[in-house]
Image (tube, rainbow, N blue to C red):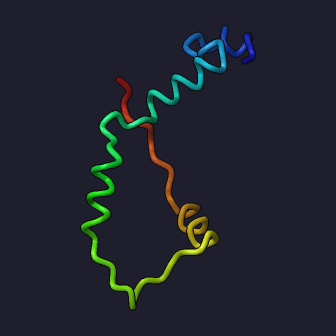
Amino acid sequence: MNTSLNKRHNKLPAESDEFNRHFSDIATDSSYNDITIQNVIDTVEVDEAKYKPLHEYEVLRLLSQVKKTSPASGS
């Protein structure tokens, strides 16, 4: 990582591992439980006659329409 950048912004981590750890810490939901998620998914009824799978380009189009949000106030 650029040390001159670190000098100007002394809160930036000096090592890439530390940088990755920092963003992993702020982007990880500590209450995430894949069993709970699967239980919710299992309760959703799907009408097979109306089910239409999404193609990759449709997902990309939808994601490109998501508006940017402000970061949460930090802890």
Quadrant occupied by the N terminus: top right
Quadrant occupied by the C terminus: top left
Q: Is residue 38 above or below residue 55?
A: above
Between residue 34 and residue 18, name the one nearer to us. Answer: 34
Between residue 52 and residue 2, name the one nearer to us. Answer: 52
User: Which residue is painted at 62% across and 20% down in the image?
Assistant: 17
Q: Is residue 4 above or below residue 69?
A: above
Q: Is residue 64 above or below residue 52?
A: above
User: Which residue is painted at 67% across and 8% down in the image?
Assistant: 7
Between residue 65 and residue 51, name the one nearer to us. Answer: 51
Between residue 21 and residue 63, name the one nearer to us. Answer: 21
Please indicate whether residue 5 sits to the left or right of residue 56 in the image.
Answer: right
Query: x and y percent of residue 31 in the render?
Result: 30, 37
Residue at the farthest bottom position: 49
Residue 49 found in image quarter: bottom left
Please indicate whether residue 24 sits to the left or right of residue 64 in the image.
Answer: left
User: Which residue is painted at 60% across and 15% down in the image?
Assistant: 13
Please indicate whether residue 48 sits to the left or right of residue 8 in the image.
Answer: left
User: Which residue is painted at 53% across and 23% down in the image?
Assistant: 21
Query: x and y percent of residue 61 in the render?
Result: 59, 68
Query: x and y percent of residue 3 in the render?
Result: 73, 11
Query: x and y percent of residue 2 in the render?
Result: 75, 16
